[in-house]
Image: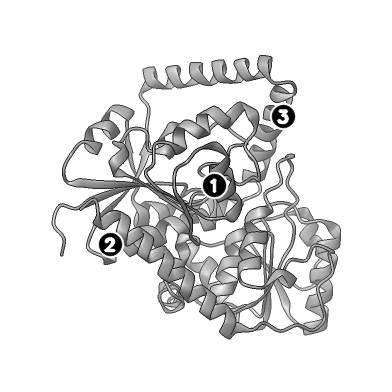
Amino acid sequence: MLMNKDIGLVTYYKENYGSILQCYATKNYLEQKGYNCHVLYEKYDARQLRVVRAKNIIFHAYNSLRYKGYFSQYMEMRKSMKKEKGYLTRRAYDFQNKFVEDMLKPQGLTWKELHSIATRDDYIAFIAGSDQIWNASIHINPIYFLQFAPKCKRIALAPSFGINSIPTYNKKTVKVGLEGFERIAVREQTGEEIIGQLCKVPTIQVTDPVFLLDVNQWKSFAESVNTPSKPYIFVHFLSEPSKDTIYEIEKLSNRTSTEVVCFSYGYKEYSIFSKITHLDGDPQEYVSLIRDASYICTDSFHSSVFSIIMHKRFYTFPRQHLHKSPQSSRIIDLLTRYDLEDRYVKSGMIPEEDSINWNAVDTTMENERIVLRKYLDEEIERRS
C-alpha cells in the first residue's frame, strides 16, 4: 500500500449520470492502485463570491462589446442549460446527490487552500478529469486547468471541449490553460486538432475514464439492484426527444413486445408511449437498467458508452439541444472508433434488423483500456 500518496481530482460530478460515473471510475481505479484520491472543488466565502461575480460581469461585458452577438448567444446558452437541468426529476437529483456524498465525498477548498495543498509533498498530482470540463462555448473556470497547482503536478485525463472549434472570445483563455500542461490526453480526435491549432503541447487521444473499469467491475458495481423482469427498452434522453424519435421508439416497442422504461426525465413527449414505466434512481440503478435492457434508446454519450461495455443493442439519436452549440462530435467520434456508426439514428429511423460484431468491439475496447491505463499510470508514476 502506498503511504501518503494523495491525488486531487477536479472534474464534473453533478446532475448527470455519466459525469458522476466517469468521476467514480477514476477515483475507484486510483484507489485500487493504492493512492488516496480526493475529489476537489472550489468553494468561496462571501467576499470571494463577490469578486468572482464581479469578474464574470466584466468578462461578459467585455466580450459583449468586442464580439458581435456574444451577449445574446450567452443568454440563450445560459437559459437553455438551466432549462435542460430542470428536466431531471427531483427524485433523481436527490438519488444522485446521495451517491455523490456517500461514494465520491467531494471536498470544497478555497483557491488559497487549493494552492496550499498543491505545494505539499504528499499531494503528488492533480488530475483535470474527463467530461466537458473544457467546453469552450462557455467561460471556463481556471480550476479546470488546474492553475492552482505547479505545472509539474498537472495531469489532463480525457477532458472534452464539447464543440468542434474554440470561439474567438475564448481562444486566449484556452491557449493559456493548455500551455499549463506538459502533456495532454483528450477524449476526441477533434480535441487533438483544437490543441494543435492553439499550442505545441504534446497530445494523445484516450477513451473516457469509465473504460478504466471493465465489464465485470461495472456489473459488480450494480449487482445488488433489481430491474424489471419483463423485456424493456431503456430510454434515457438528456434533452427533449423529437416527435419522430418518440414515434420510432414506440414502433420498436410494438415490434419487439417490450415495455418502455423512461429513466429520470419526465418529458411530456413520453405520454405517447402505450406501454411505459417511469423510474428514478441513483448511478447504480442507471448501470443496472442498461445491463438488463433489451434495447437502449438515448441521446446520451455515456448511455451509449455503457451500452457498448454491456454488449447491448442500442440506438443513439442526435441530441435536440436548446442552444446553438451542437455537441455531436464526441458521440460520432466514439461510434466511429468502434465501427458502430449505424447506431447513430440520424435519419430518425431505427432499422428493423441489425447485428453488432462484439468480438471486434471488445478488441477495440481492450486496446483503448490499455492505452488509457498506461497513460494514467505513467503520468502518476513519474511524479511519485
Q: Under tag 2, what secondary structure? A: helix
Residue tagged by mark 3?
A: 73
Q: Which amino acid does label 3 sit on?
A: Gln
For residue 250, say whether it is visible: yes
Q: Position of residue 90 (x, y in %)?
A: 57, 50
Residue tagged by mark 1?
A: 132
Q: What residue type is labelled 2?
A: Glu
Q: Under tag 3, what secondary structure? A: helix
Residue tagged by mark 2?
A: 31
Q: Which of marks 1 and 2 is nearer the N terminus?
A: 2
What residue is drawn where x is 32% and y is 30%? Answer: 110
For residue 212, say whether it is visible: no
Q: Earlier in the sequence, mark 3 or mark 2?
A: 2
Q: In this view, does 206 lie to the left or right of 90?
A: left
User: Circles 1 and 2: CB distance less than 8 Å?
Assistant: no
What residue is drawn where x is 38% and y is 39%? Answer: 41
